[in-house]
Amino acid sequence: MKISVIIVDDNSFIREGLKIILSTYAEFEVLDTVSDGKEAVDYCLKNKVDIALLDVRMPNMNGVEASKLITEQTSTKPIILTTFDDDEYILEAIKNGAKGYLLKNNDPEQIRDAIKSVYNGNSIIQEVILEKIKSNLAEKKAPETPIDLGLFTEREREIMSLIAKGYSNKAISKQLFISEGTVANYITSILNKTGLEHRTQIAIYYLKGKVE
């Protein structure tokens, strides 16, 4: 069964380029391309879409607002495709339901792998973007939301730290010499304690609370 995708970008060159690239992979079906967030929300409400690839800066409705509505009103999983100059949108997009945050200059294989990973229930944020978030937060004098370390076990804190460094569950399991299933159980525990929804939000939560 193919993964259904829509491409959302106000730049027609990027829309068509991504469509051509994704269409070369047998596992994807590009249902349509649209030019703004409002069109994306409307399309996802009317059609079964697995993944919405969203630009950030678009007319009528940007990718952050669209991610929020798509997450709240449909089963579609939003992935943001951005450029380096969109720093101010990163945290907002993740808080509003984006399951992935990637740079547009990625190799096609990286975009393909990210789509498949998000489709399979994971969240993706590139290490370079995490570093940008960490750098931005480090410029602040104090954490916005200090973490109550008493809420978490030592192992949970270790796992949050590794997630914030961009480690996958597999990489965490190798680093800590525990099974991937055990890692997943710890992540579920962290999500329950924090009220967060996915691992990317854990990374942001940890960075915002730990970076001084």
Image (cartoon, rainbow, N blue to C red):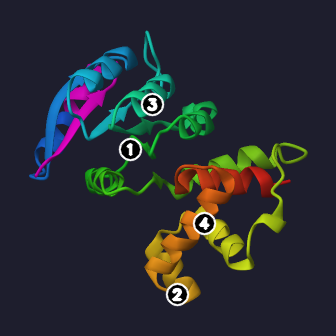
Per the rendering, the mark at residue 72 is: 3
Relative to the observer, which residue lies in front, 131 or 187? 187
Q: Percent from the top left, x then y, of residue 92?
A: 60, 33
How far apart marks 4 and 1 lie (CA) works out to 35 Å
Q: Quadrant of residue 89?
A: top right
* Disc 2 residue crowd, few under 14, some 14–19, many 20+, Cα 10 Å: few
> What residue occupies the far right of the structure in this picture?
141
Three-letter code for the amino acid on which mark 2 is drawn:
Ile
Residue stretch in magenta: 1-17
Q: Is residue 74 left or right of residue 181?
A: left
Residue named by callout 4: 189
Whether tag 4 and tag 1 are in contact, CB under 8 A, the answer is: no
How far apart marks 4 and 2 lie (CA) works out to 16 Å
Tag 3 secondary structure: helix
Per the rendering, the mark at residue 105 is: 1
Per the rendering, the mark at residue 178 is: 2
Considering only vertical position in the picture, is 27 above or below 32? below
Tag 4 secondary structure: helix
Report the mark closest to the observer, 3 or 1.
3
Q: Percent from the top left, x then y, of residue 150?
A: 83, 67
Task: Work out whether mark 3 precedes mark 4 in sequence or the reverse, and give the earlier one.
Answer: 3
Tag 1 secondary structure: loop
Task: Work out whether mark 3 precedes mark 2 in sequence or the reverse, and give the earlier one.
Answer: 3
Task: Work out whether mark 1 precedes mark 2 in sequence or the reverse, and give the earlier one.
Answer: 1
How far apart marks 3 and 4 lie (CA) works out to 23 Å
Q: Percent from the top left, x then y, of residue 27?
A: 13, 52
